[in-house]
Image (cartoon, rainbow, N blue to C red):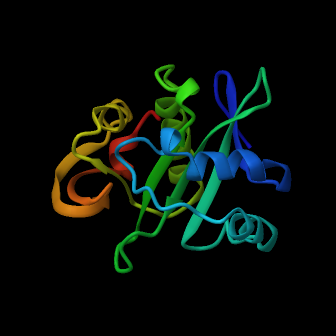
Amino acid sequence: MIRGSNFIIRHIVHGDLAALVHLMNDPDVRGEYLPSAMQSPIEVERKIQSGAMVNDDFVRFVIVDVATEKVIGTIFYFKAVPYFDAREIGYTMDPQARGRGVATEAVGLLVRYLFNSTRFNRLEIRMDSRNTASENVAIKCGFRKEGVARGANFVRGQHVDMNVYALLRHEAVGM
């Protein structure tokens, strides 16, 4: 478990199924910048039970508000490019939890955890080029923009550009 100022980041447990399905499937939560493909609740439950939410190439955590004990988001990291010694970080926040700095703090905590507990030298965050909120999270956490992956994602019927941000281990000093 990773403790934030008013939330914790922890592994997913069976009791998180309803909240997780909501965060993964509700169009209002997914917002205008993420693909709108829905995941079956049965498949999500199977992944929780089988441990598929945690493996060598993909780890998903939930972000839980300490005061309400409610799941307010997810944060995950995964191997995006097979030949990189890197992981990409992603996150989703319930709309009611946005704008409070939780995503920024959670990303910073995950970065610290990964650089202290793994050998990864590079962490990345990629976001729809129109998603200024996620871009601000990356910048506040010390990630540097490396470029734009043109037409790299398919969102709501159109191909969109993705900004690519990265942080190297030696750049994360003091995190």
* Relative height, residue 78 to residue 75 (above, below): below
> Residue 151 or 126: which is nearer the viewer?
151
Q: Position of residue 59 (x, y in %)?
A: 61, 62
Q: Position of residue 46 (x, y in %)?
A: 76, 71
Relative side of 55 to 18, left or right: left
Residue sitting at 34 percent across and 80 percent down?
A: 83
Q: Position of residue 113 (x, y in %)?
A: 58, 47
Q: How many marks?
A: 0
> Residue 27 or 80: which is nearer the viewer?
27
Quadrant the N terminus occupies: top right
Q: Position of residue 13 (x, y in %)?
A: 81, 54
* Relative height, residue 79 to residue 164 (above, below): below
Residue sitting at 59 percent across and 63 percent down?
A: 39
Residue farthest to the right? 15
Relative side of 93 to 134, left or right: right
> Residue 42 or 76: which is nearer the viewer?
42
* Relative height, residue 17 to residue 83 (above, below): above
Residue sitting at 40 percent across and 69 percent down?
A: 80
Residue sitting at 64 percent across and 72 percent down?
A: 55
Relative side of 122 to 11, left or right: left
Residue farthest to the front? 157
